[in-house]
């Protein structure tokens, strides 16, 4: 006989933030929420906003942390929480501590790949924002 573990997956709430919108209706509203999560960090972080089918905010999570010049991110990191929480869509955001919100070629390539993977999984990638200083850029506008 072999003992096979049986698991239960649970979401654990790690705090609450006040936000003035219940729904995300565009990149401007998403950037307000993401600025609060990413502003003034001395290192790069990637956060995700989980959305329902009507774009109601279901929650946020930090899914990667890195150094000054990047944070390692895999599709598994991106979609694990979205599937567990039952999100229909997501918005990614990360900061550039350099002060320049211009997306890198790697940022754009990763976003394209994640959009394709999301289609297969049934989780739409609505946007990927780059936050830096007091400005931001939408990668959706570039692809």
Image (cartoon, grey):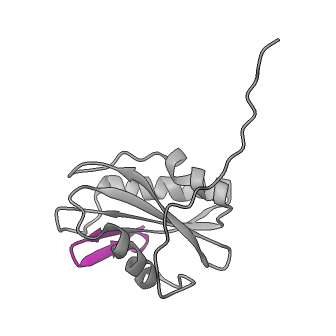
Is 105 placed left or right of 120 in the picture? left
Q: For the view shown, which residue lies furthest in the left direction?
A: 98
Q: Say which of 142 and 34 sits in front.
A: 34
Question: Which residue is drawn at the image coordinates 43% and 71% (left, top)?
Answer: 140
Asked whether 142 falls inside the magenta stretch, the response is yes
Residue 78 in the image: state x and y as whole percent.
51, 53
In the image, is residue 14 above or below residue 134?
above
Is residue 10 part of the magenta span, yes or no? no
Outermost residue to the bottom: 20
Residue stretch rendered in magenta on the structure: 130-143
Which of the 4 quarters of the picture holds residue 125?
A: bottom right
Residue at 42% over, 77% down: 33
In the depicted view, which residue is nearer to us: 96 or 57? 57
Q: Position of residue 48 (x, y in %)?
A: 48, 63
Point out residue 32 in the picture as x, y percentages from the top left corner: 39, 81
Q: Residue at x 44, y 78 (%)?
A: 30
């Amino acid at each position: 006989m072999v003992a096979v573990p049986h698991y239960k997956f649970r979401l654990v709430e790690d705090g609450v933030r006040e936000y003035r919108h219940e729904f995300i209706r565009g990149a401007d509203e998403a950037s307000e929420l993401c600025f609060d999560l990413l502003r003034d960090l001395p290192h790069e972080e990637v956060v995700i906003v989980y959305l329902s089918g009507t774009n109601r905010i279901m929650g946020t999570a930090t899914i990667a942390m890195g150094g000054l010049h990047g944070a390692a991110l895999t599709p598994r990191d991106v979609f694990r929480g979205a599937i567990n929480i039952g999100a229909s869509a997501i918005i990614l955001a990360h900061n550039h501590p350099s002060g320049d919100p211009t997306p890198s070629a790697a940022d754009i390539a990763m976003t394209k790949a994640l959009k394709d993977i999301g289609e297969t999984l049934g989780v739409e990638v609505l946007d990927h924002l780059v936050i830096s200083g007091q400005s931001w850029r939408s990668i959706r506008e570039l692809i």
